[in-house]
Structures are given as C-alpha cells and as structure tokens.
Image: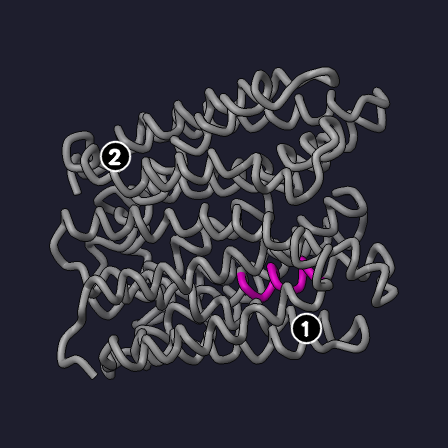
Amino acid sequence: MPEKLSSGWVLALTAAAQFVLQLDFAIVNVALPTVQRELGFTEAGLQWVVTGYALTFGALLLVGGRFGDLIGYRRTLIGGLTLFALTSLSGGLAAGAGVLVASRIVQGASAALIAPAALALLAHAHPEPRARIRAMGIFQGSVAAGASAGIVLGGILTQYVGWRSVLLINPPLIVILIALILWRVPAIPGHSGIRLDLPGALTATAAVAALIYGVSQGQQNGFGSPDSWIALVAAAVLAVVFVLVERRIADPILPFSLLRGGGRPAALIAILVIGAVLAGYVYFVSMYLQHVLGLSAVQTGLALVPATLTALLVSTQMARRMLPRLGYRRQLLLALALVGAGQFWLSQVTATGSYAVNVLGGILLTAAGMGLALPAASLALTADAPPHQRGTAGALFASGQQLGSAIGIAVLATIAAAVTDTTGDLVCGYRLSFLVATGLIVLAGIALSITRTTSRP
C-alpha cells in the first residue's frame, strides 16, 4: 500500500465510484417496463424501485458524510461499495417484487455512504487549488458519462441479456474497484475529536425522507393527495425542529458555518436549481425522443452522447481554466445563462420536429452549462471546509443535487401531465416543462447576482 495519497489514483477511483452510481440509476430506469412485466409489479409498486432508492439516498447523505468524517473516508467508501455490490446481487437475483424493492432501499443507503466519501477523499488528495479544480471537473464529468452510458447499456442489456443483468453488472465492477482502492489508496484515519450528532441525524433523515416521499407522491397522485401534503407538512415541521436542535448541539451533524462564506451560498442555490432542471431535462428529452420522434431506448442514449462529450470537455478543460479568472459567482452565472438558453431552445420542440433542429442545440447548451456549474459548485462547497468536515461538505453537495432532482422531476412532471391532460397534446406538456425550467434558471440567476461571495477560489 502506498504511504501517501496518489492524487491520480484517487481521482481515477473516486470518479469511477461516481460513474458506477450514475450508471446504476440510469440503467435501472431503462429496465423498469421489463421489470414490471416479469415480476408482476403494480404501477404504484413499480415506483418504489426508484423512490425507495432515492428516499434512502437523499435522507441518509448527511449521516453518510458524517460517518466519513468519523471513521475515515476510505473505510466509508469501501463499506458503501461493498453494501452496494451485495444489494445489486440480491436485487438482480430477486424472485419477487418485495425483495427487489428492499434491495433498492438498502442500495440507496449504501450510495449515501459512497457519494460524500468519494468527494471528500478527492478534496483531501488535491490540496492545491488548480489541481483540485481540474480534479473536480473530471469527477463531475463522470456524472454525465455514467448517466449516458446507463441509458445505452440499459437498453442493450435489457433487450439482449435480460433486466437482471442491469443490476448484476455492478458486483464485478465494484470488486475490481475495491481491490484497486485497497492497493492504491492508503487509509485515512477518522477524526476522533468529533461524534455523531444523533438527534440531528434523526431529524435530518426524517425531514429529507418526508420531503422526498411527499414530492414523489405528489408526482404520482397529485400534490393535493393526503399522502403528499401530510408528508410535506411533516417535512417542514421536522426541518424547523432540525434547525432548533442543531443550534443547541456543540458538534452538529450540519455545522451552519458550511452554509456561509466563500462561494457556498451561490453554490447551494446553483446546485439545487441545476439539480432540478437536470432531472427534468433528461426525463423530458428522453420522452420526446422516444414518444414523439420514435427512437428506441438505445438510440435515445446514443442521441445524448454529444451532450455527454460536451459536458466532459467543458468540465475537464474549460472550467478549470475559467474558474480562477471568473470566480465562483460569475462562472455560475455564465453556467446558468447557458443552461437557461438550452432549456429555452428545447421549449420550442414540435410534434413534427427533428433531433438536429429541435434537440441537439438545446442539449449541447445545457451540457456546456452543467460542465461549468458542477465543478465550480462542488469546489465552492468543499474547498475551504475544515479537514474534519469534508465528508459533511461532500454530503451537502450531494444532498443539494438529490433534493433538487427529486423536487424538480416531481414538479415539472406534474405540470407537464396537467397540461397534457387538459389539451390532449403531449408535446405541449413538454414545451411548458422546459419553459418552467427556463424560468427557474432566471430566478436562480437573480438570486446569485445579489449573493455575496468570495471572488476567487
């Protein structure tokens, strides 16, 4: 085992871990129709294959980040990957719907250990600002690569091998990944001077779980349904309780200092809104390509490859050169402008449109904006975090993405469905969802323009 961290190996292995998470999420979504047929899921039950994962992932991120600070980032990452592999195996071999849902719920918990530990380990291995900017760009580029690969592989594996293969592909990949981590990444001890804030952990977990459950039920049954509004009210009450509890704790699970200073306020605004827009963008572009233009799932994945390559190029090459000159806020504002332009482009889709005219320009602009935004936001949240809080800072970034994604897809899908039901026009619903996303980007830009931040990383 090496005596000190090899930044190149840490970058490669943490990016690979992030790639696996994104690959899994996208690949499972593609296989859902086949899963429903073969395991006899009801419509309500099928949503729990996705919602169960999202609920535990989002709800336990702060706890996962704190575990990394407590016991060490490598140990947390390996533990999370091991659990992820085991739950992939149990899900892939599931004989019934209940086992698959249970596996996905526990798999979400394992992802909540992996995501913040990987980001914290990356920050720890790249203390020099320019190296960290480049590393964050590559790390966030793996998000786009994993999502796009998942769509393509999901279609191929489901069609030619079977839906179980989309889960069973994970264990061998993770075994190799863990072996390389044990070989190339030394153990980093946890910080003995901190402890797990149990009251804060319980209230934060309950609040986020209630929020994700409430918005998912709102998407399925309408936000006026009892399941939705009761859960959302509970989430609001629990959030207030969480703040009150944290103010009285000497060593809180979420130090409020991590929410202030530097580029953090701007980064939090950007990541929440971009998380919301990104989830809706991938969903509605995929629906338009398949339901209106008639592409298959595999063709849809291939159609998104130019966007993936653009995001990778921008995040790994342009973002690291621009951020030292522009600073956090101006780079995030530029990113929002590009994403907003892309969403407005997509809002012009028509029933007789084409990929080249109606889609390509929009996804390239959106991807370029994402490539600028994600490295800047992740760096702003983790760069100045104290060493004993890097896991929590990584969890804060991942939580922003996850909450934004959950809320965004629920709200935008509900709006699109309401318009489609009223007008009978599927494309009209898609157009309005992209327009609403454009409006969210404009509001985020206004908020960022009045947010005080540190000018340079």
Give the residue type that dot 1 points to. Gly
- Mark 2 or mark 1: which comes first in sequence? 1
Q: Is residue 227 above or below residue 335?
A: below
Give the residue type that dot 2 points to. Met
Q: How many marks?
A: 2
If the image is split into quadrants, where does the N terminus sit?
bottom left
In the rendered image, residue 40, in percent from the top left (x then y), is placed at 88, 65
Report the magenta stretch's main SS. helix
Q: Is residue 42 above or below residue 92?
A: above
**Colour setup of the view:** one colour
| Residue drawn 59% across the image and 44% down it | 407
Q: Which residue is mark 2?
A: 318
Q: Which residue is mark 1?
A: 92
Residue 97 in the figure: left or right of residue 340:
right
Classed neighbour count for the residue bearing mark 1: other residues with Cα under 10 Å, few (<14), some (14–19), many (≥20) = many
| Residue drawn 71% across the image and 31% down it | 415
Residue 356 in the figure: left or right of residue 16:
right
In the rendered image, residue 198, in percent from the top left (x then y), is placed at 45, 77
Inspect this view and state whether residue 408 appears: no
Marks 2 and 1 sit apart, C-alpha to C-alpha, by 40 Å
What is the span of residues highlighted in magenta in the rendered image? 49-57
| Residue drawn 32% across the image and 40% down it | 315
Residue 78 in the figure: left or right of residue 288:
left
Depth check: give the residue in front, 397 or 209. 397
Circles 2 and 1: CB distance less than 8 Å? no
Inspect this view and state whether residue 136 appears: yes
